[in-house]
Image (tube, coloured by chain):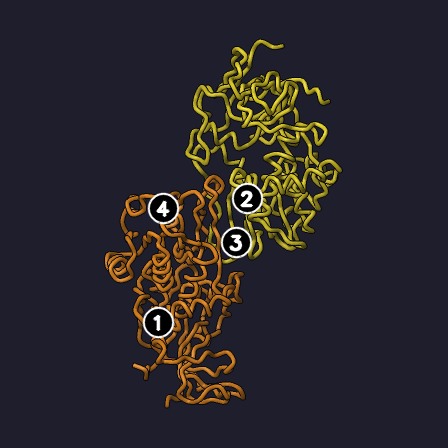
Chain colours: A yellow, B orange
């Protein structure tokens, strides 16, 4: 049994793209679970683009991470000791306890996982927050109809891959945008999108070729040059599901967006959302998606990086688009494998 | 009885702000009504911002006016001769027959007006397209709730004045933005808005002072500097009703808009609409608004310019914000007054 808890703290607020020096890795004693708590040993830590906002200190929908705090994050782990009646030693559970190898967590804030139902890591990806994000954005804003053209940026990413597969199941023409030939091949050949545009090339021409009838729904994860290429190609009554704009999260000054004259003329709907506003959709999403994940009809890909010491570097890579699939840090042994 | 029909034709497409030389005024013979048509003598011609788009030739929701065509527009007139069973000489009617003093129009395309029900000119303003525009934007996009703060730009204009009064009736705090002290005084003292900001001053500071709880709904008629000042002050879940952006209609190159990162973070909904998509709302709007107009509970103001020869100059003034109230060209005598 390990004697230490290793944590990643926010050492200073990043200015632009984060650098490793913005993070501090420290060792401390194992936490002691109080009454109603369990001691969890982390197995998988999820790294997600939204974390960039949390460490920036800007006013946002959630309170920022303070300097010296453990960086926030969702973890799948295993119970080492339980002082909560709902958990026993050896149980697997999921909760938000940050970039650290161990944590004492209120049992009430944990969700027990059944490793026989789905690989436990999927609670961080396709059956977790990213999957629900894709579902909620399509359902509450995009409302894609059969025959419409849906474009998804960051198409090989944790959210984009699910968004595109779900739109495809609605009978849409689905076009992904991703960085590089490998990711594009995965998006079409494995995920089943109709086409994929490599954003390293001539974006506008490639989007025109892939979307001969224009774009009805755009699932936006990226911003920047991709948004500038997609926006003028939206059809009348087009919907922009504003899920994320990772390419602009490191901007020190916000850059201008598209002229909204087209939003009037084309009756566009441009709408942002945050998955936590749609927690009520979680049961219906899981009821739909979990069987499809088990049967293989909904596909996913994980990019697993070993060791908490590599979390800062992997997170910087995520902001630069260097991951391929859902980015996960392996914190410790996975006995289910 | 006049022997000529005077028309305003599009002589060339404006480059930026229109100039009088973009228009041609020509006289021709009175048109001859065919079977099922009536000959109408125009009394009031409506001038509206959307016309700038029509004469620009750009791809839009309606086909553009071609060079040499009569410029499109809605008119209230009186029947001089009828070859349609639904109309008799002397009847008042409303229809879209352009910048001209007379027209032969299909009776089926006309709406008969009862001068006893409301002043016939209101069919061009508060009980016409602009009024329905305000209603449809609030109802289908803004959905203002009691206690919310609603900001309306071009607040003394044909659409803005109705939008603000309707939001006020929903129990909202309503703040107008208008150009100059006279318009602002009218917006607060006559229309009953809670406050009005003069956009000639320090917009940001004035909006902050007038909107201590931020902005929940923005009824956008203007764009430009006003939009840049309002956008960062939108609250979480704010709605931008994208009705028009008159300040940018004369741009030769579209200017950039606001960064959409805030749309994600604050879950904004930015949505354009065109009143013609919402024609089905017309009966319920008129059922609500007509009695309020008759009782004086809904107020309106008309800016009437005499003579079709002045239409080009008045239209240019509209694009420059020089009108004060619904801009109407008086084409001929109004026997109801």
Question: Are callouts 3 and 4 both on one chain?
Answer: no
10 Å neighbourhood of mark 1: few (<14), some, or many (≥20)?
many
User: Residue B261 or A30: which is nearer the viewer?
Assistant: A30
Q: Quick one: label 4 or label 1, which is nearer the N terminus?
A: 4
Residue at image mark 1: B328
In x, y percent, where is residue A207? Answer: 63, 47
Q: Residue A11 carries which label?
A: none
User: Residue A321 or A108: which is nearer the viewer?
Assistant: A108
Question: Which of the two marks, 1 or 3, is nearer to us in this view?
Answer: 3
Q: Quick one: label 3 or label 2, which is nearer the N terminus?
A: 2
Residue at image mark 2: A227
Q: Distance between the residues labelled 4 and 1?
A: 30 Å
Q: Quadrant of the C terminus of chain A?
A: top right
Task: Identify the residue at image location x=60%, y=29%.
Answer: A111
10 Å neighbourhood of mark 2: few (<14), some, or many (≥20)?
many
Residue at image mark 3: A268
In x, y percent, where is residue A52? Answer: 50, 30
- Asked if the residue under mark 2 is in contact with the one under mark 3, i.e. CB atoms within 8 Å, the reply is no
Q: Distance between the residues labelled 3 and 4?
A: 22 Å
Residue at image mark 4: B229
Q: Is residue A136 visible?
A: yes
Task: Identify the residue at image location x=49%, y=86%.
Answer: B86
Question: Which of the two marks, 3 or 2, is nearer to us in this view?
Answer: 3
- Element under label 2? helix
Q: In this view, does A187 lie above or below A32?
A: below
Q: Can residue A264 be seen in this view?
A: no
Q: How far apart are marks 2 and 1 (CA)?
A: 41 Å
Q: Distance between the residues labelled 1 and 3?
A: 30 Å
Q: Is residue B158 above or below residue A262?
A: below
């Amino acid at each position: 049994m390990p004697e230490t808890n290793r944590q990643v703290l926010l050492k200073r607020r990043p200015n632009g793209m984060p650098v490793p020096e913005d993070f501090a890795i420290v060792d401390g004693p194992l936490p002691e679970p109080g009454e109603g708590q369990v001691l969890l040993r982390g197995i998988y830590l999820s790294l997600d683009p939204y974390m960039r906002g949390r460490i920036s200190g800007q006013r946002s929908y959630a309170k920022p991470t303070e300097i010296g705090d453990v960086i926030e994050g969702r973890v799948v782990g295993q119970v080492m000791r339980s002082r909560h009646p709902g958990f026993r030693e050896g149980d697997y559970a999921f909760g938000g306890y940050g970039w650290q190898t161990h944590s004492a967590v209120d049992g009430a804030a944990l969700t027990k996982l059944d490793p026989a139902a789905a690989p436990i890591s999927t609670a961080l990806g396709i059956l977790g927050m990213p999957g629900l994000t894709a579902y909620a954005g399509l359902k509450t804003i995009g409302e894609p109809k059969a025959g419409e053209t849906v474009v998804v940026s960051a198409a090989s990413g944790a959210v984009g891959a699910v968004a595109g597969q779900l739109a495809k199941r609605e009978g849409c023409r689905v076009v992904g945008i991703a960085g590089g030939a490998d990711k594009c091949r995965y998006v079409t050949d494995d995920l089943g999108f109709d086409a994929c545009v490599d954003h390293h090339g001539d974006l506008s021409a490639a989007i025109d070729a892939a979307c001969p009838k224009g774009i009805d729904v755009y699932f936006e994860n990226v911003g920047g040059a991709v948004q500038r290429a997609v926006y003028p190609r939206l059809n009348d009554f087009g919907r922009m599901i504003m899920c994320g704009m990772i390419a602009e999260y490191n901007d020190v000054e916000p850059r201008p967006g598209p002229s909204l004259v087209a939003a009037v003329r084309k009756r566009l709907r441009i709408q942002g959302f945050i998955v936590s506003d749609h927690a009520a959709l979680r049961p219906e999403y899981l009821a739909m998606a979990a069987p499809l994940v088990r049967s293989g009809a909904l596909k996913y890909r994980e990019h697993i990086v070993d060791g908490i010491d590599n979390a800062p570097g992997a997170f910087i890579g995520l902001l630069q688009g260097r991951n391929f699939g859902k980015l996960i840090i392996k914190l410790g042994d996975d006995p289910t494998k």
